[in-house]
Image: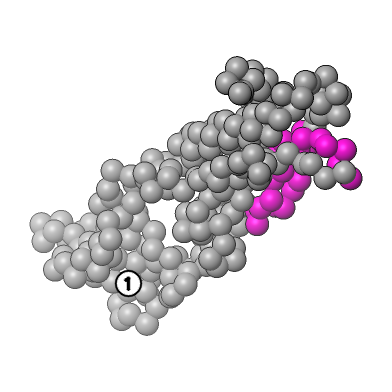
Amino acid sequence: MEKGVDVIVTLLTYCTQPNCARRLTAFRAFSIWGCAVLEISADFDRLERALTDVALRQLPFATAMALNDTAKDVQEAEEQELVEELDKPTPFTRRGVYVQRASKRRLSARVGIKRIQAGYLNLQVTGGTRKPKGRALVVPVKARLNKYGNMPKGSVGRTAARKNTFVAGRGRSGTKHLRAGIYQRPAKSARSQSPKLLIAFEPRAKYKSRIKFRPVAADVARVRFPNHLPRRLKQALATAK
């Protein structure tokens, strides 16, 4: 994942260059997660021959509105994908899907993932191995979590500082036989019990690909854009001066 780069999930574009025969490129996916291209085309040559001069003047505006409608549909579908595939995603994560709207002078709408959210969603999309930035990854085992299933900020330090906990790991006397992490000591009345692992320190974590941003966007764009364009063109003609 490149630093400081938003991930473009979907780029919806109306191509007006001669070499593309004035066809609609209704879905194009550029992504650090795959860089695939998928196009949906409509024969605008034949459509434009059938339109009046008034309708032709309204076509760019209607196309921009249809692209924006489709981009909004894709955004909502991607947010739902996060809800279905992740365990209790936070509002911040769900707000990571953004839309850059099209205009009649720039017939391109973009749906993307903001850079911060893209940074930690990357492996949920591609799968792979996550390595720690520091000594180890912090993995909750029996630690207290918030309503979104995450450890509250600063909870590792607070847990390690409690009187009834200790840190185990390499180089720590008497704990080499234990899995690295933060443990809770058993109560004095239960000394025969083993210490309880609250937070584990792992050298790596493996992820499976779970979030299907590209297929979801492609399916929505294919279905929704052909419905939005005629409706938007009809509205534009009804209000044309």
> Could you classify mark 1 by the number of other residues whose Cα lies within 10 Å: few (under 14), some (14-19), or many (20 or more)?
many
Span highlighted in magenta in the image: 19-40
**Which is more toward the observer, 49 or 42?**
49
**Which is more toward the observer, 166 or 227?**
227
Q: Is residue 25 magenta?
A: yes
Query: Where is residue 26 shown, x and y percent of the image?
Result: 72, 35
Residue found 81% across the figure and 26% down from its top: 48
Specify the principal SS of the magenta part: loop
Query: Where is residue 170 shown, x and y percent of the image?
Result: 40, 78
- Is residue 159 visible to the viewer in this orientation of the structure? yes
Quadrant where the image shows the N terminus: bottom right
Residue found 64% across the figure and 20% down from its top: 237
- Is residue 207 visible to the viewer in this orientation of the structure? no
Quadrant in the picture for residue 46: top right
Residue marked by disc 1: 168
Query: Where is residue 142 shown, x and y percent of the image?
Result: 29, 52
Q: Secondary structure at mark 1?
A: strand
Query: Where is residue 15 shown, x and y percent of the image?
Result: 77, 41
Q: Amino acid at mark 1?
A: Ala
Question: Is residue 132 rendered to the left or right of residue 67?
Answer: left
**Which is more toward the observer, 185 or 206?**
206
Question: Is residue 118 rendered to the left or right of residue 143?
Answer: right
